[in-house]
Image (spheres, grey):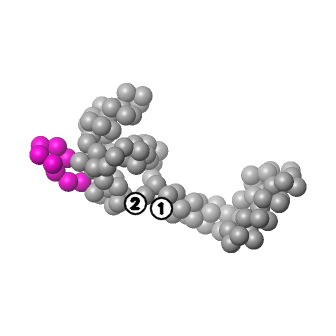
Amino acid sequence: MPDSEFEVMEAVWKLSPPVSTNEITSMIGGDKHWKPQTILTLLTRLVEKGFLESSKQGRERRFSPIISEEEYLQVETKNFMKRHYNNSITQLVNTLYDGKGLSNKDIDELKEWLNNGG
């Protein structure tokens, strides 16, 4: 998901769905200098991709998430791990620490995490 679409999804998750274009524009439009039409375009794309559903309430279209933020991040993290690290947590940790090694505290925390079922 492109960053712009993710920012819109974050707004939908943070607001109380179902949300209107105006609510999202009020939350993020000013910071980004996005016009309401830009946000509506992003919302439409997210509906087409299956991340949001839309319903009409009076004259207004409102949007609700189909997937939670946690579910989305799990899917994205799994895809990232598969694409960049061949699903190897060891390769990821090596990259994060740039071959400098882990502190004893880091190792203890990882052991505890693994012992608790990851």
Which amino acid type is marked by label 2? Ile
The percent position of residue 35, horizontal first and vertical second, equals 30, 31
* Up/down of 42 relative to 73, above or below: above
**Residue 98 - label:** none
The percent position of residue 52, horizontal first and vertical second, equals 32, 55
Which amino acid type is marked by label 1? Glu
Give the prevailing secondary structure in the magenta stretch: strand
Q: Secondary structure at mark 2?
A: loop
The span from disc 1 to disc 2 (Cα, nearest Å) is 6 Å
**Residue 87 as seen in the image, left or right of residue 39:** right
Q: Residue at x 33, y 32 (%)?
A: 26
Magenta highlight range: 54-61
The percent position of residue 54, horizontal first and vertical second, equals 24, 54
Residue that numbered label 2 is attached to: 67
Callout count: 2
**Mark 1 and mark 2 residues within 8 Å of each other at the beta carbon:** yes
Query: Label 1: few (<14), some or many (≥20) within 10 Å?
Result: few
For the residue pair 44 and 24, the one nearer the viewer reads as 24
**Residue 107 as seen in the image, left or right of residue 48:** right
Q: Residue at x 71, y 70 (%)?
A: 116
For the residue pair 60 and 38, the one nearer the viewer reads as 60
Q: Quadrant of residue 53?
A: bottom left
Query: Label 2: few (<14), some or many (≥20) within 10 Å?
Result: some
**Residue 71 - label:** 1
Q: Quadrant of residue 7?
A: top left
